[in-house]
Image (spheres, rainbow, N blue to C red):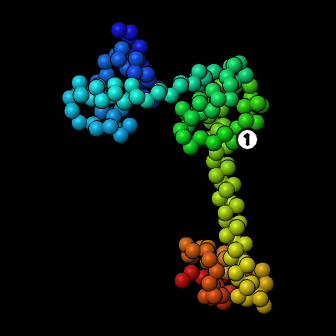
């Protein structure tokens, strides 16, 4: 038996699995992750895992390593996607900005690209939140003017700001007009 035992995960083939001994804890954890029964002896768990692996094709491991230099690998786009899916998970999105970052940093390691990905991901998430808040504000102002055609934008903005500091729902209600008569800095 070889000494470098592969991890018991979705990348292992049934042939690799059969070459090594795995602890009962490793077998239980594998069974749990794949929705298999986790009770029984080590021999029963090993048989259950073997049967699962026999019927399921293992995922292909990425040939890209964290230390790989971006510009020096002969990786295809499929290899790159596989690498990010392994590192980030199934909710990985290949943002245009990540592609641009990879093209602009060919001397960087893929490890650095993961840091860039997380920065890009959070920027995109924050941008989406800003757009949602802007849409919410526009809807509030529209509803405000439908109910109060004689008021101006300063009134709507005052009500929005005062409501934002006090309430969770940002939908316009006629009772929001109370904020126009409230002294600045007054809290209920």
Q: Position of residue 53 (x, y in %)?
A: 39, 27
Nearer the observer, 35 or 104: 35
**In the rendered view, does 55 fall on the left or right side of 97?**
left
Nearer the observer, 173 or 177: 173
Asked whether residue 119 appears in the rendered view, the answer is no
Q: Residue 67 sits in which quadrant?
A: top right
Q: Residue 149 sits in which quadrant?
A: bottom right
Asked whether residue 140 appears in the rendered view, the answer is yes
Residue ranking furthest to the left: 41
Residue pictured at 28% horizontal, 38% vertical? 37
Residue pictured at 21% horizontal, 33% vertical? 40
**In the rendered view, does 8 fall on the left or right side of 137?**
left
Residue pictured at 47% horizontal, 26% vertical? 58
- Residue holding disc 1: 96
Position of residue 106 relative to residue 126, above or below, is above
Q: Position of residue 72 (x, y in %)?
A: 71, 18
Q: Residue 79 sits in which quadrant?
A: top right
Q: Position of residue 152 (x, y in %)?
A: 79, 84
Q: Position of residue 114 (x, y in %)?
A: 62, 34
**In the rendered view, does 178 fall on the left or right side of 156?**
left
Position of residue 129 relative to residue 47, above or below, is below
Nearer the observer, 72 or 52: 52
Query: Badge 1: few (under 14), some or many (20 or more) residues near its Cα, within 10 Å?
Result: few
Residue ranking furthest to the front: 55
Residue pictured at 68% horizontal, 19% vertical? 73
Q: Quadrant of the N terminus?
A: top left
């Amino acid at each position: 038996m070889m000494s470098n035992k592969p991890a018991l995960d979705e990348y292992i083939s049934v042939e690799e699995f059969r070459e090594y001994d795995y602890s009962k804890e490793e077998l239980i954890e594998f069974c749990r992750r794949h929705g298999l029964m986790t009770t029984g002896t080590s021999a029963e768990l090993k048989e259950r895992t073997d049967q699962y692996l026999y019927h399921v094709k293992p995922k292909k491991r990425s040939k890209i390593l964290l230390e790989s230099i971006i510009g020096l690998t002969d990786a295809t786009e499929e290899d790159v996607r596989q690498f990010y899916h392994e590192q980030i998970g199934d909710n990985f999105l290949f943002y245009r900005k990540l592609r641009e970052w990879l093209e602009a940093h060919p001397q960087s390691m893929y490890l650095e690209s993961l840091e860039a990905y997380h920065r890009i991901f959070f920027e995109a998430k924050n941008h989406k939140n800003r757009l949602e808040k802007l849409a919410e504000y526009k809807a509030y102002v529209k509803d405000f003017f439908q109910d109060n055609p004689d008021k101006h934008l300063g009134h709507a903005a005052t009500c929005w700001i005062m409501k934002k500091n006090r309430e969770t729902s940002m939908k316009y209600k006629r009772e929001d007009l109370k904020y126009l008569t409230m002294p600045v800095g007054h809290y209920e």
